[in-house]
Image (spheres, rainbow, N blue to C red):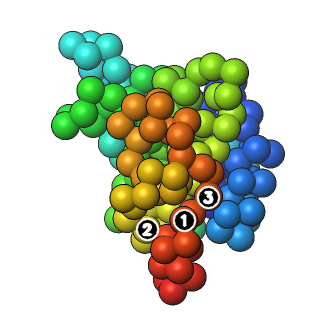
Amino acid sequence: MVNLYQQEGLDYFELISLALRNEYNLSTIKAGKFEIPAKAFNPLRNQYDASRIIESLIPKFDNKSDLNLLITDVDLYVPRFNFIFGLAEIQERAAIVSRYRLNGSNMKERLVKEVIHEVGHLLGLPHCPVPACVMYFSNTIDDTDKKSSHLCQECRRRFEEL
């Protein structure tokens, strides 16, 4: 089960629900809206710390055995990177994906790929060396565009063994 939290003003429930059902056979429920906490903003970078956003929302998570997915439209980062498209905090069973850098005519396709990628991490899948696999690490938007929205054969095998 995936609890989907979306930033106020966003509604990608149908798109994400279908993608997660098709790729991982997971059910998704609307868990509600959320606001980005002010403490997550870093004025020196003009970006939001993805880990702090997840951390601030942990008290909202009802069932600790469910997966929690946050969708936002702010520019995210973690300390080692200039920016990130998304982040999975495996121990917290929570992931965040931002559409901020996914803009363009294929934004929804990009969003689906990043959601499937981050939920894959929550399910125990590592990054994959195959550029066409959805679990391939996207360093740029071109990497996201080049990969598919599906697991490669090896990642599919790993997933089925989990």
Q: Residue at x 33, y 42 (%)?
A: 51
Front residue (pair 25, 52): 25
Label 2: which residue? Answer: 125
CA–CA distance in space, label 3 to label 1: 6 Å
CA–CA distance in space, label 3 to label 2: 13 Å
Foreground mark, 3 or 2? 3
Q: Residue at x 76, y 44 (%)?
A: 15
Circle 3 — which element? loop
Label 3: which residue? Answer: 150
Q: Residues within 10 Å of mark 3 (few under 14, many from 20)?
A: many
CA–CA distance in space, label 2 to label 1: 12 Å
Q: Amino acid at mark 1?
A: Cys
Q: Are marks 3 and 1 in contact (CB under 8 Å)?
A: yes
Left/right placement of residue 54 relative to residue 106 reads left
Circle 1 — which element? loop
Label 1: which residue? Answer: 152
